[in-house]
Image (cartoon, rainbow, N blue to C red):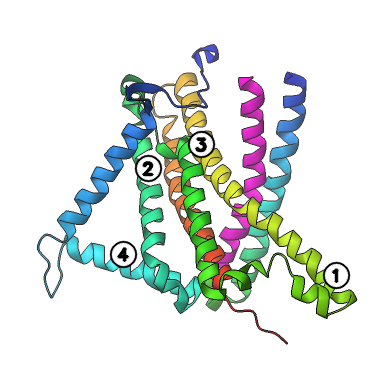
Amino acid sequence: MSTYISLLLPLGLAIPAIAIGLIGAKGLDAISRQPEVASKLQLNMILAIAFAEGLGVLTFVLILIMINK
Amino acid sequence: MGDLSQLQVHLTPKTLFHIGFVNITDTIVMMWIIMAVLIGLALIARMRLKYLPSGFQNFVEWSLGGMRNFMSDVGGTEAKKHFTIFITFFLFILFSNWLGLALGPIAEEFHLRAPTSDINTTAALSIVAFIYFEVAGMKAHGFFGYLGHFINLKALFTQGPMGVIEFFVGILHIISEIVRPLALALRLFGNIFGGEMVLMVAFLMVKGLVPVPFMMLEVIVGLIQAFVFTTLFLTFTSMNTAHEEHS
């Protein structure tokens, strides 16, 4: 069981982390190019980050269920 | 260094006592406290209403007005009709996240934890949200009109081969509609529960001021998650009530 967890945890957390980083980087790029639309971009950024983060959270919940068995 | 083997993972809340056949758990008691706080704040805010607000009334009006403007920015003027339920969700989630943190140090003694760190609470919240935005969609399009988005018989029989594609797109919509409340519930639960686990490990491993940055991070996470839940709810509602533009 711990082998599965040690494989699942880094994969399931690293990939959403990359996604969140990309969203943040691109969003900041766009904001620095056009500061007028910052509020709109930030909102969409946060929403997209929430979706990407949901995958990481899913991994976390799965691992908790595996531990608790 | 503390002993990590002391760390216990409680996915389910602790049952404190029974009323009839209903189990009253620690998260339910915490929820009662939060309800009392919210109702008390609302009563204090409306106790002495003045035409020219000052002090607490001013703060409440300013924050509610700001959120109202924000919501109409996101969901259009249509969203203002649904303002009450969004603000209720936002305040409840925010207060339960933050009170769970604030009462964290005495949590062990009195078995108090944030209601949002219990999957039953988040599931209940997301089911209410799900029913709300489905009914809002039905109100906007009519019952059969709304179901027509999912089981698109009209397109299947009138549009020929393109209609078949439209029909299967409708079936994909059913899946995405079912995933929405599941994702809402799991996202909120996972974030708050994960934060509590991180704090627990931090408090077990090191003493002193070291866990304070984690605490600060959790304060921000609590705000962001309340915001995200409300914004997604708002987005789903305005997506369901929006009238499609046919080209």
Distance from label 1 to label 4 (Cα)? 49 Å
Both marks 2 and 3 on one chain: yes
**Magenta part of the protein: which range?**
A41-69
Crowding at dot 2, Cα within 10 Å, few <14 / some 14-19 / many 20+, comes out as: many
Disc 1 versus disc 4: nearer the observer = 1
N-terminal label among 1 and 4: 4
Disc 4 target residue:
B63
Chain at numbered mark 2? B
Quick one: label 1 or label 3, which is nearer the N terminus?
3
Q: Amino acid at mark 3?
A: Ile
Binning the other alpha carbons within 10 Å of mark 1 as few (below 14), some (14 to 19) or many (20 upward) gives: some
> How many C-alpha atoms fall within 10 Å of the one at disc 3: few (<14), some, or many (≥20)?
some
User: Mark 3 falls on what kind of element?
Assistant: helix
Is residue B117 toward the left or the right of residue B109 in the image? right
Q: Earlier in the sequence, mark 2 or mark 4?
A: 4
Answer left or right for B56 relative to B35.
left
For this rendering, which residue is in front, B30 or B9? B30
From this view, report whether residue B192 is shown above or below residue B177. Answer: above
Q: Which residue is mark 3?
A: B119
Give residue B74's position: percent from left, percent from top: 50, 71
Q: Amino acid at mark 2?
A: Ser
Q: Residue at x 72, y 38 (%)?
A: A12
Q: Give the residue at the far right of this rendering.
A: B161
* Mark-to-mark CA distance, 2 and 4: 19 Å
**Which of the two labelled residues, at mark 2 and mark 3, occupies the earlier sequence position?**
2
